[in-house]
Amino acid sequence: MKVMHRNILFTIIAILVVLILVNVLHEAPTYNLKLETLKQEYAIKPTPSVDHSKLEILQQNFETPQEVTAACISCHTETHKEVMASSHWNWERLSYVEGRGISASGKNTLLNNFCIGSNSNQQACAACHIGFGMNDDHFDYKNALNVDCMVCHDNSEEYKKGTSMAGYPDRTVNLQKVAQSVGTPQRNNCGSCHFFSGGGNNVKHGDLEVAQLSTTRDVDVHMAVNGMNMSCVDCHTAENHQIIGKLYSVSTNNTDRATCEQCHTNTPHFSHVLNRHGSKVSCQACHIPEYAKVNATKMAWHWSEAGKMKDGEPYHEEDSIGNHRYLSMKGSFKWEQNVKPDYVWFNGTADQYHLGDSITSVPVQINTLYGNYSDRNSKIIPVKIHVGDQIYDKEFKRLIQPKLYSENEGDSAFWKDFDWEKASIAGMHEVGLPFSGNYGFVETEMYWPVNHMVAPKEQALSCVECHSPDGRLAGLEGFYMPGRDRNKTLDTAGTWLIVLALLAVVGHGLTRIISTIAKDKYEKQVIDYRQEDLTD
Amino acid sequence: MRKVYIYKGFERFWHWTQAALILFLAVTGFEVHGSFEIFGFEKAVQFHRVASWMLIGLIVFAIFWHITTGEWKQYIPTTKKLKEQLVYYVSGIFKGEKHPTAKTELSKLNPLQRMVYLSFKLILIPMTIISGIFYMLYKTIDQNNLVVVEDYPLESIAFWHTLGAILLMVFLIVHVYMTTTGETPTSNIKAMLTGYEDLEDEHTENEPLKNTH
Ligand code: HEM
């Protein structure tokens, strides 16, 4: 009977010990089959089915870019229709926005807190429009020959748009060479606009810049040449020229987004705890610990300081890493490198400040990302918050679209004449809004979701980056997070309770010891007396 | 005096394993809580979860043992001599008086212990474990996930769990100290280690304590 008991006991202990050891020593396997399959899939780059240099129609000396487009359309007979239905062409998208109804949002109707707005500045801004001939007066959105196929499909790295040429290519471009080497868009096609938005490399996004043309895994695991060497369109796939993925400075709806999950699924980790984080935390939040890893990005832009002169001439100042700190044309800037993102709740829907909207709060929210903890579709995402100030109409309480660019002086353009009033009159006239003549500068904020520059998994955030009182999520409210939050009353009461218990125990124990000693003495004395009695 | 086999093998195993687990859970738990840093948050969470499953397993065995052996009857509360026991701890103990209740293998616990241990077993442990399980299964959902504990505020789950943890620490302190109030300061601990304890002969007392149930 006893032996049996001992055996049972031994078995239980043995099982427990094994369980403990298995759990403590168990390391997640490093071989991730899911990831391995993905890598294999993307390692094989497709070979094009057509070599355009062999096509007869492309063996000609193109005089104008429109002739190239005509040649494209002669084979791709309906493709221009797809392109002309895209936001790359229309510079706006129709969507339903809560409180606004169905409205068009895009570069034509919105402002930002960088170069403010394209209206009245098209001649310059059209360098990033996929069309030819967009200038202040007009653009024929119906003319298929104005579609610029080459800017996206040139694979020769020859093509580039001219500066302030209304979207026309630079005069040096060899159109024949470009036409013969078209193919799937490469990184530098997308990058020629998306890396330089805001007027310079990495100005706006912070996570999209020229470095990604040729970079290492530390900077971007996807695009790294020593990594998967992926192109933009590997993730930003397209059907009928409608490319998925959108930027919430101009987009509003939770549709057609490019997501990590489209490849990685929503259970990419071995650890259930981590996978479960995915219901509230975006992949990007942990896997993009920093952005602007190679070159700095603009964090602040104060237009209010623009227009100062040195000896009657516009001037510029540079900061220690060679970025403009001040430009008479644009005001003062703040640049930062290796920036830790801010974090916000986001459910995929957003709204923007539309031209003509009244200012209701300061800083003016150029765009608003919606979401909060209790919203099921919301996740915590990393963002770059770009702050600044810009010109507004003090009387009508709305932001002003100033005319900035012109080729000539005396054309009201701020960049030539440095006169805000004239620039405002011209700009507001162009967009068809009244201007009171009374202007000032108002603080603005703009939110840029950070989605690129995904770091190698070893660099993903560790738990305590967020699970601590002063961690990265210290500012996010409305929910309880272990390690960050605690019930202060309970903690204080608990500490006191434990201290009191210790005191009570120590007090009781000491009293016992003292009383025992006293009693011992007393007993010894008794014995002593007895001994005395005996000896007597 | 007679040497009595008072704590059975399983009982001792259960007692010490549970003590170790609770201590370990307290260390890892309070690390998660942010009170100090030992293993690092991530490891603390892992260890806490593993240890908590072990504690749950152990307690399932313990419940089974209590029921099948009838040992649960040891915990039936009584008010008989409760006051005397209290008075003893507050004053009698300092005067070197004898324990008002005698410990026997049929009645191992004095009335105060019965009450405290019963509430430990019926309130404190369940509160901590159940809130812990809720904590562990806590997740809110997105479109593709199953609901386990949906949107039940983690804040209150954590409150009850932390409260349990604090009270367990208070219990631990007082409990450990109280073990030194036996015949000699170490006699109780020795008994829980070896199973054997020297107890008063049952009938030398003028009023032998009968089992009160
Ligand atoms: C079977 C029993 C238990 C279960 C299932 C359990 C489960 C959990 C879980 C899931 C957490 C959140 C951290 C994490 O995700 O791992 C947690 C936190 C914690 N646990 Fe436990 N636990 C148990 C027992 C205990 C015990 C016995 C103690 C202390 C004596 C304890 C003290 C704590 C503390 C202090 C926290 C931090 C709470 C906070 O700051 O929000 N737990 N526990």
Image (cartoon, coloured by chain):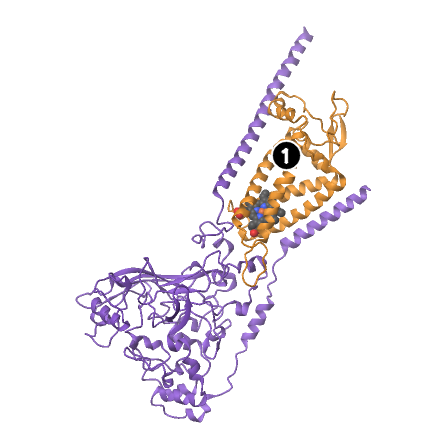
Image location (x, y in percent) of residue A530: 67, 10
Q: Residue furthest right?
A: A1
Examine the rendered structure and indicate whether residue A351 appears above or below residue B194.
below
Where is mark 1, residue-wise?
B116
Q: Residue at x 66, y 47 (%)?
A: B56
The amino acid type found where label 1 is placed reads: Val
Quadrant, the C terminus of chain A: top right
In this rendering, would A141 be left or right of B89? left
Residue A247 visible, this angle: no
Which element carries disc 1, helix, strand or loop?
helix
Residue B108 visible, this angle: yes
In this rendering, would A87 be left or right of A283? left
Examine the rendered structure and indicate whether residue A426 appears above or below residue A278.
below
Q: Which chain is purple?
A: A
Image location (x, y in percent) of residue A218: 47, 66
| Chain to which mark 1 belongs | B
Q: Residue at x 58, y 23 (%)?
A: A514
Q: Quadrant of residue B147?
A: bottom right
Image location (x, y in percent) of residue A366: 35, 63
Q: Residue at x 54, y 51 (%)?
A: B152
Say which colour chain B has.
orange
Q: Residue at x 40, y 72 (%)?
A: A94
In this rendering, would A528 be left or right of A211? right
Neighbor class of circle 1 (other Cα within 10 Å; few <14, some 14-19, many 20+) is some
Examine the rendered structure and indicate whether residue A536 appears above or below residue A78.
above
Examine the rendered structure and indicate whether residue A333 appears above or below residue A58.
above
Whether ligand 1 has any atom under 8 Å from the Cβ at mark 1 is answered as no
Quadrant, the N terminus of chain A: top right
In this rendering, would B166 be left or right of A202? right
